Structures are given as structure tokens and as C-alpha cells.
Image (cartoon, helix red, strand yellow):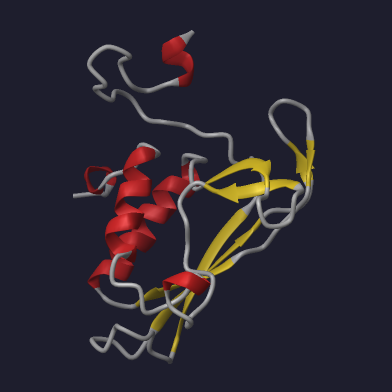
Amino acid sequence: RWFAEKRRCPRCQCSFGKTVGKQPRVGSFSWKLEDFPLAGHSDTKQTIVIQFRFPPGIDDDGNTFEGRSPKGYLPCNTQGILLLELFKVAFRRRVMFGIGTSMTFGSYRPTFNVHIKTSSHGGAAKHGYPDPDYYKRSLDELKANGVTLADLPG
């Protein structure tokens, strides 16, 4: 049973296989470029705008959940493009989001396993930019959900 739910050895903590999560089965992930820079990223004048859409539905355990459509922002530079590609992997494996009770809204809905910047400004405290630690923090959250740079095509 342990290995059916965890992709990590309980003894040595070595990971194996691909983690598949409990993100809603029905949803979409799209992205586009917009012509504005994000604070703290003077190396680019463009921003990657990402959009997730989850309609209301029923989770794998038969519970009804609310829909949601969070929008996020990444700098259009090497770090932002790498995160976009890793987010694609995480979304396909259903680990980008989980389903649980939202701490903000108190309702049962898709919740972030890997946090995105939902504001283009306001700094880390307001889920925006600048945030010099966001790239590393995102890589750590992705790794905790079984997605690493090694999962990207050669």
C-alpha cells in the first residue's frame, strides 16, 4: 500500500517512478506572452502569463469541489521558461494542484501544491514580484511533488 501512494522508499527516502497526484482530472493550462516586464527582471521586457482553469467537479473520492481559474506570471527569461516547462510536466502528472479546503476561501477546491505568482507586482507578501527567492522555492516545491529538471526532454 505504501508504494501505491508514495513514490519514495520509507527506509532510505529514495524516489522511484513518476508521482501522479490528485489534481482534478478535468482542467486546462494555457500560456501567452505579454509585453510588460516584471519587477526584479530587467533582463526581459516580456512576461509569460499562465492560466489554469478547473470547472466545478467531483474528485477521485466522489466529493464535489468548486471550480477555479487562477492566473499567474513568470518572467520571460531562462528561469521563467524553465519553470513553465516544469509546470507543464507537473500539470500533466496532476501534481501542480491538489484538492482540499482553501485556507483563503474555506471551500473545497483545487489548491496549489506548487505556488504560482498570482500578481505581477506587490512583492512576495502579495504573491507578486519582485521575489528573488521564487525560482528556488518553485524548484523545491516541484521536487517535493516529484518533478525535477531531469524530467525535461534532453
**Which residue is at a point 52% across and 34% down the rendered structure image?**
21
Q: Image check: 71 left or right of 60?
A: left
Image position of 33 with respect to 13: above or below:
below
Image position of 60 with respect to 117: above or below:
above
Image position of 28 with respect to 120: above or below:
above
Q: Position of residue 17 (x, y in %)?
A: 33, 25
Q: Image check: 21 left or right of 148?
A: right
Q: Position of residue 104 (x, y in %)?
A: 68, 57
Q: Taking the image as drawn, is residue 130 in sight?
A: yes
Q: Image check: 93 left or right of 16?
A: right
Q: Residue furthest top?
A: 1
Q: Taking the image as drawn, is residue 24 in sight?
A: no
Q: Image check: 70 left or right of 10?
A: right
Image position of 41 with respect to 7: above or below:
below
Q: Position of residue 137 (x, y in %)?
A: 33, 56
Q: Position of residue 70 (x, y in %)?
A: 62, 64
Q: Residue furthest front?
A: 125
Q: Residue furthest left?
A: 154
Report the label total.
Answer: 0
Residue nearest the observer in this picture, 60 or 116: 116
Q: Quadrant of residue 118?
A: bottom right
**Which residue is at a point 43% across and 91% down the rendered structure image?**
35
**Which residue is at a point 27% across and 49% down the rendered structure image?**
152
